[in-house]
Amino acid sequence: MPHAHAHHPHPSRTAALNRAFAWGIVLNVAFVAAECVAGLWYGSIGLLSDAGHNLSDVAGLVLALVAFRLARRRPTARYTYGYKKSTVLISLLNSLLLLLAAGAIVVESILRLRHPVPVVGAAVAWTAGAGVAINGFTAWLFMKERRHDLNVRGAYLHMAADALVSVGVVIWGVVVGRTGWTPADPIAGLVVAAVIVASGWSLLRDSLRLALDGVPAGIDPGRIEALIAAEEGVAAVHHLHVWAVSTTENALTVHVAVGDLPRLETIRRRLRERLREEGVAHATFEFETAGAPCTGCGEGDE
């Protein structure tokens, strides 16, 4: 069966993403340490919850970097698609880390609402302000590639959510500093959790779909089937399956009944080219003679 292989990303893109991950990890490790010290010193649950979220982001960035590099490794006899699926698994794990962090923040914030603790608002605001700059810059590093790679999108969502959360903590820090209203701090923690859940749930949904070999976002099976059926010489199309090999590459298998056998190679080449334009990098065709019984079409094979 003819098989179409995708090329690896351009070296400049790979280098840029490697730099983005490295900058993100280094900056966020330094900021988590500073935020933890400030949160413990001033007794701020807003800062500590944000530090906890940032720590999960560091773990997420490290995992995303590992998956990104694993996906570049060559296939082996045992892993014939290489380690590309690791990007999907890491995206799924990252979404679970986000939701776990949100749960921990909610619990701690509720405890602080029931048992308020005085907070130095100005210190909280200044520390969180540094977070806005660091997380905003890191999110910007991933902004361009977030639409093309779910793994990078996970890193981007972590950073963008953190930047928004830090803005909220700055606001609440100013409120506490000016009014002395201590419930503002745990309320800031709950706002943090809400933002995390919103971004984490979206990532979980998309990652779970790819992990279960669902049709990737942006791929319309009906359109793909119609595209193949419209090719000159194709008599029928059936048993179409589309799934994600990684967060950036999609694969397809399909049975194609051909009425014009001399044009078989031309049909195969044209279909491969058109499918690449539709975002399918790996295409495997099972060609059949039009009108002949389908071989390998089991009763449970849809």
Image (cartoon, helix red, strand yellow):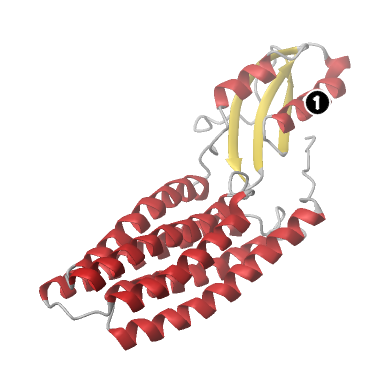
* Image position of 61 with respect to 80: above or below: below
x, y percent for residue 193: 31, 61
Report the residue at 59% width, 33% height from top: 241
Pick out the residue farthest to the left.
114
x, y percent for residue 225: 62, 21
Residue 100, quarter of picture: bottom left
Identify the element where label 1 is drawn: helix
* Image position of 274 with respect to 230: above or below: below
x, y percent for residue 231: 74, 15
Pick out the residue farthest to the front.
178
Q: Quick check: 139 left or right of 107? A: right
Q: Which of 164 and 232 is in front in this view?
A: 164
Report the residue at 46% width, 78% height from top: 32
* Res 89 seen here: no
Q: Nearer the viewer, residue 6 or 265?
A: 6
Residue at mark 1: 268
| Badge 1: residue crowd in 10 Å (few <14, some 14–19, many ≥20) | some
x, y percent for residue 139: 55, 58
For badge 1, the amino acid type reads Arg
Residue 47, quarter of picture: bottom left
* Image position of 125 with respect to 72: above or below: below
Q: Quick check: 238 left or right of 276? A: left
Quadrant where the N terminus is found in the figure = top right
Pick out the residue farthest to the right.
262
Q: Nearer the viewer, residue 57 or 179?
A: 179
Q: Which of 133 and 277 is in front in this view?
A: 133
Report the residue at 43% width, 68% height from top: 129
